[in-house]
Image (spheres, rainbow, N blue to C red):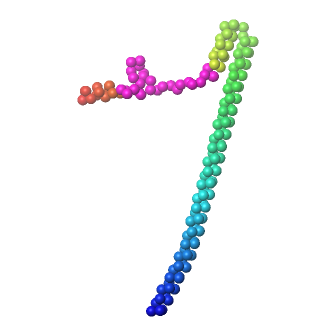
Amino acid sequence: MTNLIMAAVAALVVGILIGVLLGRSTGQGSSLRQRRTEQQVDELRNEYTRYQAQVNEHFMESAHLLRRFNDSYRDVNQHMAKSATRLCNDDELIHELEQNSAQRLKDERKEGSEPPRDYAPKDPDGSGTLAEDYGLKEKAKAKAKA
């Protein structure tokens, strides 16, 4: 019986040692995975920050180029108007060019323009596609015929 107790104690000690060794190796694996995951999160965060910076830079450059384009257009327009004034002898044409030039510059500066309304009624008596009763008359007629 003492041999049996000694064997049980030895099996217990061996089991504890195996458990401790497995626990350490598993614990290192999970911390390794955790570090890798944290690195991936940091890399993604850095990539996202770089992407945001690139987008901001793109729109800043686009705004600058569009501003230069508008300035160049205005300069060409003024040059053409001045040249027409100098080279043309027709007073009506000169007056019209000056008015058109001034009108276009005013139109460029207008803000708050509204996009076209696709839902507007096609005929004056009809209702638009966003009206509550849009399309109900045709359905009622179809049901009445059936």
Left or right of 87 in this view: 21: left
Q: Where is residue 49? Give x, y as percent.
A: 64, 47
Q: Residue at x 53, y 76 (%)?
A: 19
- Residue 13 among those drawn in magenta: no
Q: Where is residue 125? Give x, y as percent.
A: 39, 18
Q: Quadrant of residue 65?
A: top right
- Residue 131 among those drawn in magenta: yes
Asked if 55 appears above or below 83 in the picture, the reply is below
Asked if 29 appears above or below 1 in the picture, the reply is above
Left or right of 4 in this view: 29: right
Left or right of 25 in this view: 57: right
Q: Residue at x 32, y 25 (%)?
A: 137
Asked if 112 appears above or below 6 in the picture, the reply is above
In the image, the segment drawn in magenta is 107-134
Q: Residue at x 70, y 29 (%)?
A: 68
Q: Quadrant of residue 136?
A: top left
Q: Quadrant of residue 17?
A: bottom right
Q: Where is residue 104? Give x, y as percent.
A: 63, 19
- Work out whether residue 43 or residue 10 is closer to the camera in this orientation and state it: 10
- Work out whether residue 7 or residue 126 is closer to the camera in this orientation and state it: 7
